[in-house]
Image (cartoon, helix red, strand yellow):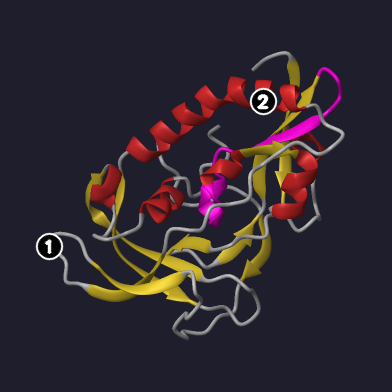
Amino acid sequence: MSRRLHPRCTNASGASQHDEAIVTAASIHPVSLKTPGHKAYTSLSLTPLPPSPPITPESHLPTTEFAHLKSFLAPLHKIYTLITTTTAMPRTTHITITLPTTNPYPIYTLHTNFGGPWMRGAAAFPRDTPRDLQLAISKLDCCDESFIHARVDWLIVTVTPQILLHYSQNPAALHVHSVILVTSASGNQYIADFSIEQFGFDTEMWFMPRVQYEQRVTDGSRVHLAQEE
């Protein structure tokens, strides 16, 4: 599986205007990030996020159906995560963070060594990079790389992210995102988002009822099937 270094998703908002102010949000703390052979860079990094509220079906959705579909998709989710976290990628030498003036989320700029050897796993990141940030970077721009007594459609959404990741050679911009819409035999709808971590959300949020997903993850606009484009 080859890693895409340039997003293929449509630009939804253009490059963000931002300043270089130090982020002081409670969920972020200063650390020293470095990799072997590179000097240390004083930067900021995402701390482990607090546990997210449990994902449960809406009151009108059957709990057994939700659990059945999630358990069926769970092996695919694990395989997807295994592939994205073990595929070789350019080593990120350091990470800088800026606080946008027009958006509420911090922007993480990934500075990579494209001329050097590609690395796998933790070796591809600066030392002390938190596990959740490693996972987020591993799944960056991989939403299209992603079945069952249910209908499956490809849904395009606009995410309201917790963080915005981008490689230093690309402008910081919010792009539309693709997810899997699962419609059960009874007509209930769920979202499977195998790469939700790239936006700073907890990995446990990868499967939830569609209504919850749209309320908690998207901005409520431009939600449509891919074939409608």
Residue 8 is inside the magenta segment: no
For the question of whether residue 60 can be seen, the reply is yes
Q: Residue 99: image x %, image y %?
A: 52, 78
Residue pushed farthest left?
Answer: 37
Which secondary structure lies at badge 1?
Answer: loop
**Image position of 91 with respect to 105: above or below:** above
Q: Earlier in the sequence, mark 1 or mark 2?
A: 1
- Per the image, the residue denoted by label 2 is 67
> Which of the 4 image quarters holds residue 59?
top right
Q: CA distance from mark 1 to mark 2?
A: 47 Å
Q: Residue 43: image x %, image y %?
A: 33, 75
Q: Is residue 97 left or right of residue 190?
A: left
Which secondary structure lies at badge 2?
Answer: helix
* Crowd class of label 2 (few under 14; some 14 to 19; many from 20; radius 10 Å): some
Q: Residue at x 80, y 52 (%)?
A: 222
Q: Residue 70: image x %, image y %?
A: 63, 27
- Per the image, the residue denoted by label 1 is 37
* Crowd class of label 1 (few under 14; some 14 to 19; many from 20; radius 10 Å): few
Which residue is more in the foreground, 117 or 139?
139
Q: Which residues are magenta?
A: 185-202
